Image (tube, rainbow, N blue to C red):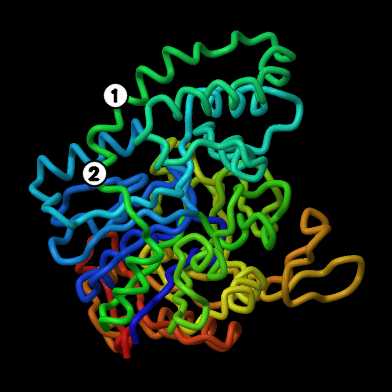
Amino acid sequence: MTALVVVGAQWGDEGKGKVVDLLTAEADEVVRFGGGANAGHTLVVGGEKVVFHLVPSAALHSRPRCLLGAGMVIDPKVLAKELEVMSARGLLPEGRMVISENAHLVLPQHFLVDGIREAGPNPIGTTKRGIGPCYQDRAARRGLRAGDLRDPDGFRAKLADNLEGWRPVIEAAGAEMPDPEAIAAEYLALAAPIVPWLGDVGDELHRAREAGRRIVLEGAQGTMLDIDHGTYPFVTSSSVTAGGACTGSGLAPTHIDAVIGISKAYTTRVGEGPFPTELHGEQGEALRRAGGEYGATTGRPRRCGWLDLPVLRHAARVNGLTSIALTKLDVLSGQETLEVCVAYELDGVRRDTPPAIGLERVKPIYETVPGWSGDITGARSLDELPAAARDYVRMIEEAVSVPVSILSVGADRAETITLGDPWA
């Protein structure tokens, strides 16, 4: 195999950073294909916690190149800081990074409008990082792209036009219009560490594939937050599924060899929107504490609930999953029994996958399965897991008709069971 796509199979925060980190050990190219600094990839390496927001988590390895695709929306402030951190760690030798010239830039007006909307009567529950308004500019064909940082005069002209497009929204909210000269001065000053890395990511990936180099395409968020296939309107503003990996990177669909979906052993989501298996009160809080369920980007507490198999079936079909990486199995240790949502009931009809409209009205159909006890973080094979934990994994495989290829039993990179070679 040459190219693997890694996507979230739930509402994001599934542990993609750790899985990509594992795959990166044998990868030559790792590319982020969508999203922006609203995503946080948290890794624990040797007990040290590291969080990346834009740069692929592969940055911790010396071997692969890190590529930021055209489907991303990039906050230059965050990117400049992450490049600085990488440089300080000796992780930015020549040729290590490629940033797509076509990736759009998140600017102060995007943060402003995002905050205005979230303070309004119908908040989505965004991270307020300007992601939605930036993608809105992209669709309206008035956005500024990373390549514009090369041309200061052109940047200023496009910025002025862009701000005029937002004037009605900003003034209607009673907010002060940003100063274009101040923005231009600040952001053009950030261009110096970014411009040298600009390039054509799609072309780079095409050449890499022809040379037989191994490529990992790293997603952000999760399937249920996809703009087309998620719980609309409580979704992100980009295509986060396997199809988005192609449009956001420039690698053709026929050049994708496998798609790995990341799922927690239970379910979480951040922000507003329907969540059929959500646990409230002390039961939900206990799961949140056990799993350390707080957003890597915002620190917000995540909503927690039982495993939702209809969601995983939907993710398997939409993405064409070839395998599942199951994370945080260790968090469920210590419970006598576990509930698993095997289907929904909607208007008296049983459904095995989520409805496009009406998810807030479904009633989850649960089955009770045996739990297990004890610390499983030291397990390095299925045989070392309690029988009930092994059965839990098999149940998921059978229900979704997709094998589990990676099993995470702890936060650290080493606390992982690999079931076969993902590159085979």
Q: Which residue is mark 1?
A: 189
* Badge 1: residue crowd in 10 Å (few <14, some 14–19, many ≥20): few
Residue at 49% x, 66% y is 245
Q: Is residue 166 above or below residue 365?
A: above
Q: How many marks?
A: 2
Check disc 2 and give the amino acid type.
Pro
Say the numbered circle drawn on residue 39.
Answer: none
Lateral position of residue 226 relative to residue 193, left or right: right
Which quadrant of the figure contains the N terminus?
bottom left
Q: Is residue 265 visible?
A: no
Q: Quadrant of residue 219?
A: bottom left
Q: Is residue 371 visible?
A: yes
Q: Are marks 2 and 1 in contact (CB under 8 Å)?
A: no
Q: Is residue 291 above or below residue 145?
A: below
Q: Looking at the picture, how far across and down is residue 101, in whole percent? A: 40, 48
| Helix, strand or loop status at disc 2 | helix
Q: Looking at the picture, how far across and down is residue 130, in whole percent? A: 53, 33
Residue at 24% x, 54% y is 97
Q: Nearer the viewer, residue 8 or 138?
A: 138
Q: Nearer the viewer, residue 367 or 91?
A: 91
Lateral position of residue 244 relative to residue 348, left or right: left
Q: Which residue is mark 2?
A: 196
Check disc 1 and give the amino acid type.
Ala
Q: Nearer the viewer, residue 385 or 17?
A: 17
Residue at 16% x, 52% y is 47
Which quadrant of the figure contains the C terminus?
bottom left
Earlier in the chain: of badge 2 and badge 1, it is 1
Q: Looking at the picture, how far across and down is residue 164, in whole percent? A: 64, 20
Lateral position of residue 308 relative to residue 40, left or right: right
Give the alpha-carbon distance from disc 2 to disc 1, as whole Å: 14 Å
Q: Is residue 108 above or below residue 132?
A: above
